[in-house]
Image (tube, rainbow, N blue to C red):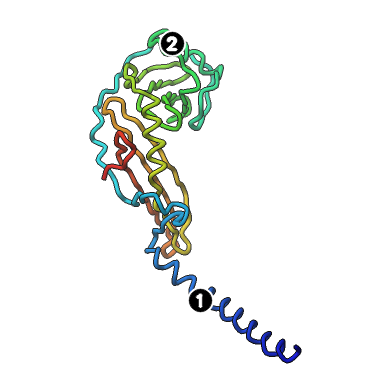
Amino acid sequence: MKIILKVIIPIITFVLITLILCYIFLKPNILMQYTKPNIAITDLTKNENKSLLKINHNIDFNFEPNDLVKVKSDNIKIGELFEVETKVYENEEYLDPVVKYIKDNFNIEINYKWSFTIKFNSDNGGMIYFEYFIGEIKTNKAINFGFNDGIINDIYYKCLDYEVNEEGLTNRFIKFIDKYHQEEVVLRKGEEKLLESTEYVYFYNAEKLVYSYLFHSKYLVEGQERYNVYQTSYLIDEVGNAVK
């Protein structure tokens, strides 16, 4: 028995060491079969039944008509404002004057389906943006207010009278994400991700649903900052397919 163990143990040890070395040295070669410079397939195994949305595939956005309407306000007074990144409307009191104006003039109730953003372009002036959402889908139904020194000066709006079957649009969105996955940007050595975002937008006045992906990065060349921008955009058809 002792003789058998003396023979078997070295053999088992040799086999294990060989397997470990093969894994270490062969794994990079396996990965390289699915990798090209700067771009790799995200979750290849998990998404093997999904089609790939290619980096730098972009559509022409000239399909949207330029029908933004501008009107003068009746000098709506607002209180002190501050910059706000895009967020869902939650009955913020400082927005009461503009929310009341929207109700009185457009017969629209601003609720959880609307998000807003406040941006300043000077010390005392800027814009309030209201955008309508259908779940995760942003739309181009919008109302914007230009303000200065506590007074609303200009009002802009778009697509307020348009409607869409929201359940049908949501089903298109769900079918799309079930069929596709995004090609991933792989950073070079020393390259740093600055921003990554995915967006779905429905254009009422063009009857088009669009998928967009954006990736920003920076890197250094001889001490100077350089930037890369990677983009993807596709139209989504009535059955949730990406239109090439």
Pick out the residue farthest to the bottom: 3
Of badges 2 and 1, nearer the viewer stands 1
The spot of residue 200 in percent (x, y) is: 39, 36
Residue depicted at x 39% and y 32%: 171
7 relative to 21, above or below: below
Pick out the residue farthest to the right: 2
Q: Quadrant of residue 38?
A: bottom left
Q: Amino acid at mark 2?
A: Lys
The spot of residue 4 in percent (x, y) is: 70, 89
Quote the CA–CA distance across marks 2 and 1: 67 Å
Residue highlighted by disc 2: 103
Image quadrant containing the C terminus: top left
* Chain-order first, disc 2 or disc 1: 1
Q: Secondary structure at mark 2?
A: helix
Q: Amino acid at mark 1?
A: Phe
Q: Quadrant of residue 7?
A: bottom right
Residue depicted at x 35% and y 49%: 53
32 relative to 197, above or below: below
219 relative to 66, above or below: below
Residue depicted at x 32% and y 21%: 159
Residue highlighted by disc 1: 25
Residue depicted at x 45% and y 59%: 187
The spot of residue 33 in percent (x, y) is: 39, 67
Q: Secondary structure at mark 1?
A: helix
Mark 2 surroundings within 10 Å by alpha-carbon count, few (fewer than 14), some (14 through 19), many (20 or more): few
Q: Which mark is residue 214?
A: none
